[in-house]
Image: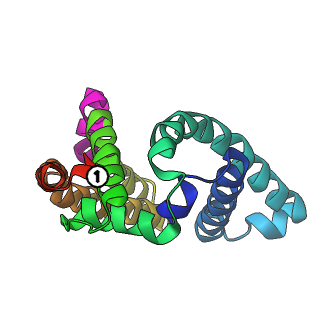
Amino acid sequence: MWARMVVAPWWLVWLVDVAVAAVALTAIVATTWPTFFATTGSWGLVALLGFSVAATGPVVLVQTSVQRSYAPALTSLSLEQRRQIITALRRGQVPSDPRVLAAAIRVGTISLAYRRRAGRWQKTAKWWLPATYVVGAVVLGFISHYTRQALLWAGFALFFAALFAWRSYRSPRLPEHVERLRAAATEIPEAA
């Protein structure tokens, strides 16, 4: 999906984000407040869609600058070549095509630069965000006796804990993979 969306126009990225947010919000609201749609009717759905449109706008605005930094390295490549870049950065496999190798090095270098620029709150979110949801689940479940909401918050805590654990597992490998690609590029003059 990333291979397609990184070169997509901003409005397409925004529409996809709105659709994903609307589906997620609808599922959350339907799970947490089962009578919400019976009470509000179609206006509830319109409100959730409106909230999705408003909430994803700033996200797409921030993503656009990041997307612009990756786009020059990727625009002239095919979808298959972009997939090879992803494989090279995730698994460390050196692509045979010099253009793909050069683009993978550029994308990896940009990714490392963004990682270094991350603020302290972004780096520590993997600890405090799941803990916040666990506290919310405990408060809602044991103190307020809102079992549905407590289960939802516990689900969020598990989701974010699994997501951050996976990223922490994969994250340290990127500098190693970029260095491997740079070493391979010194042997291939067209990629340098």
Judge left or right: residue 156 versus residue 41: left
- Of 191 and 64, nearer the camera is 191
Badge 1 amino acid: Glu
Q: Which residue is mark 1?
A: 190
Q: Which residues are magenta?
A: 115-128
Judge left or right: residue 134 versus residue 152: left
Name which residue lies at 74% across and 64% down: 36
Q: Quadrant of the C terminus?
A: top left
Report which quarter residue 58 is drawn in.
top right
Query: How far from the left and from the top, in percent, is residue 188?
Result: 19, 55
The residue most toward the right is 42
Residue 119 in magenta stretch: yes
Name which residue lies at 25% across and 28% down: 120
- Of 118 and 135, nearer the camera is 118
Q: How is the image coloured?
A: rainbow
Residue 150 in magenta stretch: no
Does 128 appear above or below 65? Answer: below
Name which residue lies at 72% across and 41% down: 54
Query: How far from the left and from the top, in percent, is residue 39?
Result: 83, 64
Label 1: element kind: helix
Asked if residue 142 shows in the view, the reply is no
Total labels drawn = 1
Judge left or right: residue 111 versus residue 40: left
Report which quarter residue 123 is drawn in.
top left
Q: Crowdedness of circle 1 by 10 Å Cα count: few (<14), some, many (20+)?
A: few
Query: How far from the left and from the top, in percent, is residue 23?
Result: 66, 66
Query: How far from the left and from the top, in percent, is residue 105?
Result: 27, 48
Asked if residue 17 shows in the view, the reply is yes
Instruction: Label the magenta part by its dominant secondary structure.
Output: helix
- Of 179 and 138, nearer the camera is 179
Name which residue lies at 30% across and 27% down: 119
